[in-house]
Image: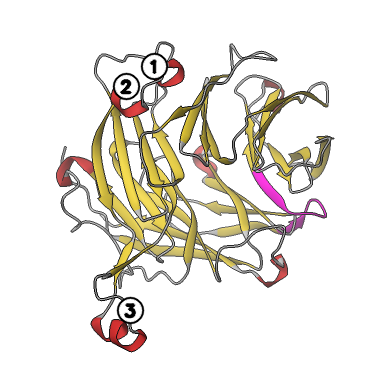
Amino acid sequence: MQSENHQLQETGSYEIDSLISTILWHKQSQQGDRIFISDWKGRLHILRSFEPGSRLKPLVSNKELIDCPILSMDINRSKEAGSNDQLIIGTAEGILGIYHVELEKLQVIGQDREKRSIAKVISIQDSPLIFTFSWEGFMTIWNSSEKECQFVHPLKANLITAEYVHPYIAILFGNNEIAFIDVVTYSQGSSIKRKPIGYNEPIRSMAFYGKNIEYLAFGDIYGGIKVLKRKSDKEDLKGLSLIYSNKTLIDCDYDAVFSYKAHCTKIPQEVKEKHMLNPKIDRVVFPVKALDFNPRNPTIVASAGGDWSIYIADIDSEKGNQNNSYIKNSKVCPFTGQFTHLKYNEEGKALITVEKDGQDVNFKETDVSKLRSTVRLLKFLQ
């Protein structure tokens, strides 16, 4: 496959005086794309990009939805949602609600019995069911039509993230285990078997490509990116041993096709000498905060890291051995903060990123009023 141009140019930005929790990019035909953003001050922001990567226009700024941090948000995919003008939100106090964008009205579905934070909310396609996940290792199933919690499922491991591609939810745990749920066949009391990913480095981000998850990507805390490709004899997920086998995911069902220490910075010699650093240590590594596959090309993976940089991995052309098509603090697009989010648009021609000022935070200990974030629209040069 021919290598693509990975040069980026900033075409728009939007400042928010808070930490951003979720960013959703929603395609809207002739009306342009809408970008939905939620923050830790309980507010909603809606931006529009009229052409892929052209510019950002604020439609709704600092809309107060609720008096506590919003930690997660998703498009309402149920049949009743209609034109996707409804957003599902989850808060730090365990409140789950539906926000009607056109009516500007928040409808509360319920609250977690223990007020556990809703770190991830997933709306299911053509279904009233909503799956929510807490950092403490609990999955809760809600029915939006009945406005109540249906079932709480202990996962017995801390959550890193969960991602949805119908009909599967992939759950990444803090102990480097992964589990897949078929939301069509899941019922109350179904067993969820976690299996090891097969890496020693702590994984902190995840992305996948295709309805049958043909490609998986992981980012670790040491700046590493690993991409896996489904083996040719594995046609779908239903029989995959990654769900049921005692072997590792890589050995059974996927081949490792790309591995690279992407987000790291070389330490200048004068810095080593000034701070009397160990001469054997020549690089500082940073966690991979976010990953996303190009929706039109599964061999192109974008990653955002804590080293104020974005890397574009061209798997086919680089084979994990070259880094000449990566972007880092480019003069074309200078990055100024730690990245927390990254998302391709539907055409794969632009990226939405979020960067924040300051160090890593914990919502239970951090004064969110002192945080600031910047949303950037980055367009790939032709």
The reply to whether residue 75 is visible in this rendering is yes
Q: Residue at position x 38%, y 15% from top? A: 236
Residue at label 1?
241
Residue at label 2?
253
User: In the structure shown, which secondary structural element does the residue marked by tag 1 occupy?
Assistant: helix
Residue 339, compared with residue 156, is above or below; it is below
Measured in 3D between alpha carbons, the distance from the residue under mark 2 to the one under mark 1, in whole angstroms, is 7 Å
Is residue 70 on the magenta stretch? yes
Measured in 3D between alpha carbons, the distance from the residue under mark 3 to the one under mark 2, in whole angstroms, is 43 Å
User: In the structure shown, which secondary structural element does the residue marked by tag 2 occupy?
Assistant: helix
Is residue 65 on the magenta stretch? yes
Q: Position of residue 248 (x, y in %)?
A: 36, 26
Label 3 vs 2, first from the N-terminus: 2
* Image quarter of the C terminus: bottom left
Measured in 3D between alpha carbons, the distance from the residue under mark 1 to the one under mark 3, in whole angstroms, is 46 Å
Please state which amino acid type lies under the numbered disc 3.
Answer: Leu
